[in-house]
Structure formats: structure tokens, C-alpha cells
Image: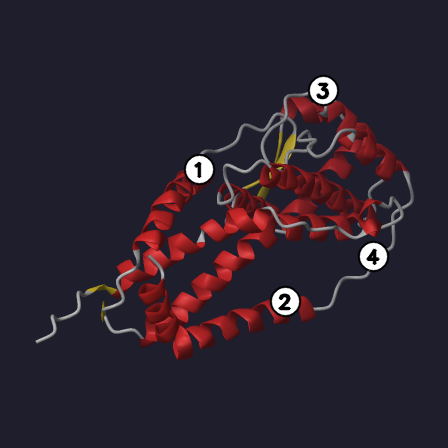
Amino acid sequence: MSPEPALISREMAGAVFALASGCLVWIACRLPFRAPRREASPETSAQVAERTSFRRLVLPMLPMAAAIFFLIGWAHTEPEQSDEIPPLSLTLAALLYGPVVVRAGIRAVRSALVRPEVSTAAAVGILRPRVVVSSEFLAGLDDEERDAVLAHEAAHVAGHDPLRLWIGQVIADLQWPLRAPALHLANWRHALGIARDEDARRAGSDGAALAAAVLKAAGYDAARSTSLAAIEGPGGALRDRVERLLAPVPTWTPPSKRLRIAWLASAALFVSLGSTVGDSIAEWLCGNLP
């Protein structure tokens, strides 16, 4: 009589498969991704650069995201007790990537709970963003500069940027210990700051006044994330930002929602595949991998 197959919980099997798929992130980080040339053009809106920089940060996570959506679909069809025991190779891969997830989780919680010290002006609050301005910094601004700074930070609040930056940091942490994600995150923060400069100017703020405020802020200690003084990005980031503030505001047409629809459709597709062929693929992995 053949022995009964070993059983483990569906959740445990899914966790091993999900963590093992995290190793795909390190492979995806090595794949080339060429940004459009128009990203670096001063005549092009920073909104384009901001979206391109964010995609560069997020793209390595797509294989893992696809695997997780696939596992969600598989979990709906798999019984509570699974007879698919993850092979040793996937278990070792899960143990290898597990510390990265734990580290990212700890840093995310700490970032959410610790209130940043704002030395200039910043949009703070992940769930309820608000503008915080240092009284010392505010005293050194004239009326035009003050209005421009407040408009810039209000644009961060309107875009829910504290939450977006928090998510971006988590995404970068999930690609640790590779160096490229930290650079992509810094480039994205720089592009995001310039994009909010453009939003403030479109709302009526004077570019020269905002440039003067940025230069004054650069003399203060940089606060976290969305602080006006947090000049991040490639070399010459401060000069690039000031030059853009003194140049005419580039025209920008908001993109269509087709890309968002495509992302949602892709997620639904992987969930559907997981519910239909997930069990077969799990059996194949468990039977063919060491």
C-alpha cells in the first residue's frame, strides 16, 4: 500500500512559493531598461521624467508581483491542506529572500511611526498628509517665496506623495542589497520634486521666487522625503532644479488611463491563471525541482 502524501497548510506552501519568487527580483534588476531620451530634455515636463523614473524603480518587482497574483488564484482552488511540498531548492530560495522581506517590513513600520523632523518645509503624514513649515525657515522668506513654498508642498499633499514615497522606499528595500534601486529611488524623488514645482507654477506661483526659496532651503539640514531641502538625484540636481524653475513651464498633457487598465487586467489575468492551472504548475515544480 502506497504511503499517504505529506500534507502542509496551504498558507505555508504559498508563503514558500511567494518568497522563492522574490529571488526573481534580483534577476530582474540586472535586466537593461532604457528610459526614453525625452526624459532628460528640459523642454519636456518633469511629469514625464517622474513617471519614467518610478517605472524604472518598479519594473524589477513585476515578476514577483505576477507570481503573487498567480498564487492568489491558486489559493482559491487549493484545499486547506496541500499535498504539494515545496522542493528543497525553492525552500532555500525562500530562506534566502526572507530576510529581505523582514528588513523591508521593519523599515516600513519604523518609517510610518517615526515623525520626521522638518527643518524647512515638507508634506508629512502617510494616511493624512499635511504641510509642515519650520517657523525659522518661514521667517527667512518674503511673501512670494512663502506662497510658492506652500503651493509646492500643497501639490505634494494633493498627489498623496508621502504615501507614494513610503511605498517607493518599500519597493527599493525589497530589492536590497543591490545598489541600483537606491539610485532609482533618489532619481525618482528628484523628478517628483521638479514635477511638484511645475504644479505650483501652474497654480500661479512665481518660478523665480520658488527657485530662491529652494536655494535658501538648501542651506538648511535636509529633512526626509518631501522636504523642500531634500535635493536628491544625480549630480547637479540642485542646479537642474533651479534652471527648470527659471525656464518657461513645459506643456504637459495628462496620460490616459489605459496603462492603469492594462495593469489591472494583467493582475486579473494572473489570478485567473492561478485558479485554473496553478495546481498543475505547483505539481510540476514539486516533481521536477530538486
In the foreground, 58 or 106? 58
Name the mark nearer the viewer: 4 or 3. Answer: 4
The residue to which callout 1 is attached is: 107
Residue type (three-letter) at the residue carrying disc 1 = Arg
Q: Is residue 128 visible?
A: no
Q: Is residue 162 above or below residue 78?
A: above
Gap in angstroms between the C-alphas marked 1 and 2: 28 Å
Q: Is residue 124 left or right of residue 154?
A: left
Gap in angstroms between the C-alphas marked 1 and 3: 28 Å
Residue type (three-letter) at the residue carrying disc 3 = Gly
Sooner in the amino-acid sequence: mark 1 or mark 2: 1
| Residue 252 numbered tag | 4
Sooner in the amino-acid sequence: mark 4 or mark 3: 3
Name the mark nearer the viewer: 2 or 3. Answer: 2
Name the image quarter holding residue 105.
top left
The residue to which callout 3 is attached is: 219
Q: Is residue 202 above or below residue 223?
A: below
In the foreground, 89 or 272? 89
Sooner in the amino-acid sequence: mark 4 or mark 2: 4
